[in-house]
Image: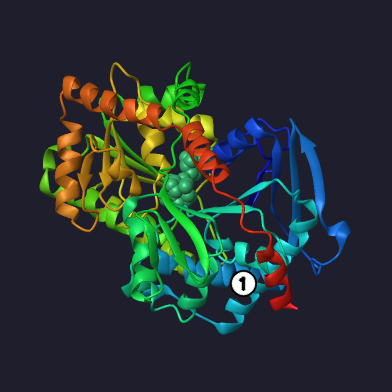
Amino acid sequence: MSRLVVVSNRIAIPDNSKASAGGLAVGVLDALKTTGGLWFGWNGEISEISGEEDDELSVVEHDGITYASMPLNQNDYDLYYCQFSNAVLWPAFHYRIDLVDFQREAWEVYCQVNDLLAKRLKPLIKEDDVLWIHDYHLLPFAAALRKIGVNNRIGFFLHIPFPTPEIFNSLPTHQELLKMMCEYDLLGFQTEADRMAFVDNLKQQDLLEEIDEKTHRAYGNTFKTEVYPIGISPDSIKEMAEGPLPPKMAAMKKDLGDVQNIISCERLDYTKGLPERFLAFEALLENFPQHRGNVRYSQIAPTSRGDVLAYQDLRHQLEMEVGRINGKYGSLHSTPLFYLNQHFDRRLLMKLFRLTDVGLVTPLRDGMNLVAKEYVAAQNPEDPGVLVLSRFAGAANEMTAALIVNPYDRDEVAAALHQALNMPLEERISRYNEMMELLRKNDIAQWSKRYVEDLQAIPVRNSGHGAVAEHAAS
Ligand code: GDG
């Protein structure tokens, strides 16, 4: 079996702390442990470097895996990461073209950083390696490697949605991006809708030759597209969720008495539909007055991408809404809405999920949404909570036993919350069992195994390609 090389924008370097790894890191580590391999990417630090010097690459071995990472300089961080990745691609791919702030200089730096990372990775690649590249920061990465003569099999997985042509065409560099993506040998998506959107973009440019349903030819390259819905590790989540509660949590449970609990947790991000969710909770209290004083909604939302303006605006908006709703529906002895702009320990979070009656996961658009899956896996099988899930999360394709809602329709979400809070035990167990079966069948280990096997099965490109590309680039 070939060695696996994983490349992602950020890499999770082991620091011997007890912190548990999140979804992507678990999947990647699982795949790397099977084949032994290399994980390469940005170490999350910003320094004064140019990125060109050999000693700026740090290489450490841990548990049979090699971690190679480098810092970014301030300009690259600002333009490649904050600007082009997170203020152009992230909003556009989540259908928020109103938030796209396209600057040509940022596009150029985005491509340059991909070129730089490719150049730094190349000496570490062996002839037989297969490369698995992750996410929207690295759309041009295969093209950057091909330019410098790397012919290895290179696969890509997009963790976020892929937009339809109407949206994608609004990006001034959409054609360049499509062309670069066609340098991959295998393009993996979270859902069939995302895969089809990518194919439709190529069709619309009149570029696509279909070899079979999922094998295509464009820009002189042959490549495959496939759907790989990312999973979780249900058993490790169950293990974290069960067992004795830490004293503060046990006291909280006691204080709550008969009050029912709704929980949500995600990075503070405008794609997650937080203001809409607050309004839906307000509609629950408005439309179903019997819940007033008897239900509490806790929203955990740690800050993410705090350097990007749209995220700062969202934070202010949420702070205002919480005050308004609590002012309207709170009393001297009850606060209906708890908003915690803090990062929680993962074990604690899973225990909290298990304590609650409803998991409210209503993003406006989401590639998959691991929280939805984690919420279900954390439940007590004998007395499970109910998942209320947005139809615009990739997870809704699989988690059909959740209460599926339109996050833009606050009355519909309120009605689903009411239904969830009143759902009989038998129905809760039946829905839980149906979802758990699926979570076990397509867990994170299966996800990475399927992807890597498919990538390994692709024939290596003809050896002339790299030489030609290298010549063209010189
Ligand atoms: C992208 C795509 C896709 C959240 N808050 C805390 C915390 N989390 C953990 C959750 C979960 C992870 O972060 C978030 O994963 P999601 O899938 O929900 O969302 P994104 O971060 O947007 O991820 C998404 C995913 O990639 C994987 O392909 O599903 O669609 O957007 O694991 O539990 N963890 C801890 N404290 C927190 O406060 N410890």
321 shown above or below 402: below
Tell me residue 206's x, y (percent).
37, 76
Tell me residue 320's x, y (percent).
36, 61
62 shown above or below 104: above
Closest to the observer, 321 or 24: 24
Toward which corner of the image does residue 201 lie, by quadrant? bottom left
The residue that appears at 57% across and 43% down in the rendered structure is 456
Quadrant for the C terminus in the image: bottom right
In this image, 348 relative to 141: left or right? left
Q: Mark 1 falls on what kind of element? A: helix
Residue annotated with mark 1: 110
Closest to the observer, 74 or 57: 57
Tell me residue 210's x, y (percent).
37, 62
Closest to the observer, 94 or 455: 455
Is residue 334 visible from the viewing direction of this image? no
Is residue 51 visible from the viewing direction of this image? yes
The residue that appears at 74% across and 32% down in the rendered structure is 64
The residue carrying pointer 1 sits among few (fewer than 14), some (14 to 19) or many (20 or more) residues within 10 Å by Cα, namely many
Count of numbered circles in the view:
1
Q: Which amino acid does label 1 sit on?
A: Tyr
In this image, 457 relative to 368: left or right? right
The residue that appears at 18% across and 51% down in the rendered structure is 283
Tell me residue 66's x, y (percent).
75, 41
252 shown above or below 318: above
Q: How is the image coloured?
A: rainbow
In this image, 145 relative to 24: left or right? right
Quadrant for the N terminus in the image: top right
Mark 1 C-beta to ligand 1 under 8 Å: no
101 shown above or below 435: below
